[in-house]
Image (cartoon, rainbow, N blue to C red):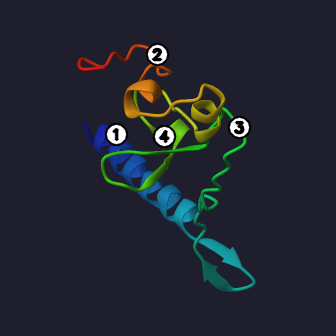
Amino acid sequence: MRKAVALFLLIVATVGLTSAAAADVRVRGAHARVHRVAPPPQYTDDSYFSDYVTGPTGAPTPVMQVPGSTSVVTRKMMDDFQSRSLCDALRLAPGVSGGGC
């Protein structure tokens, strides 16, 4: 029983040390935190591909971080297919049908 408790305490102490070591990085005696920041969205109207989508919050979100499937109708697609209304644009999205169109 004592060995099990000692092993448990050793594991807990080790996990605490490794997570603290991963959070802080020593750089010439100073502490530095490493943060990964996504590049700002770059909107281009000359492609069928979009890196970002805008959801209900209005914030641009990288396509790879959106759960589920996403269909993007770009300005280039709407221009190429001469979409003049919302119904025309919705016809370009797979799996979407407009009830009143």
Q: How far separated are the C-alphas under marks 1 and 4?
A: 45 Å
Residue 22 higher or lower than 61, as above or below: below
- The residue under the point 60% across, 81% down is 31
The three-letter code of the residue at mark 4 reads Gln
Q: For the residues carrying marks 1 and 4, which lies nearer the camera in this image?
A: 4
Whether pointer 3 and pointer 1 mark residues with C-beta atoms closer than 8 Å, the reply is no
User: What is the x, y in percent for residue 99?
Assistant: 24, 17
Q: Mark 4 or 3, which is nearer the eye?
A: 3
- Crowd tier of the residue under label 3, counting other residues whose Cα lies within 10 Å: few below 14, some 14–19, many 20 or above: few
Q: Point out which mark residue 3 bears.
A: 1
Which x, y percent locates residue 100? 24, 20
In primary-sequence order, the first of circles 4 and 3 is: 3
Name the residue type under label 2.
Answer: Pro
Q: Quadrant of the N terminus?
A: top left
- The mark lying in front, picked from 3 and 1, is 3
Identified by mark 3, the residue type is Ser
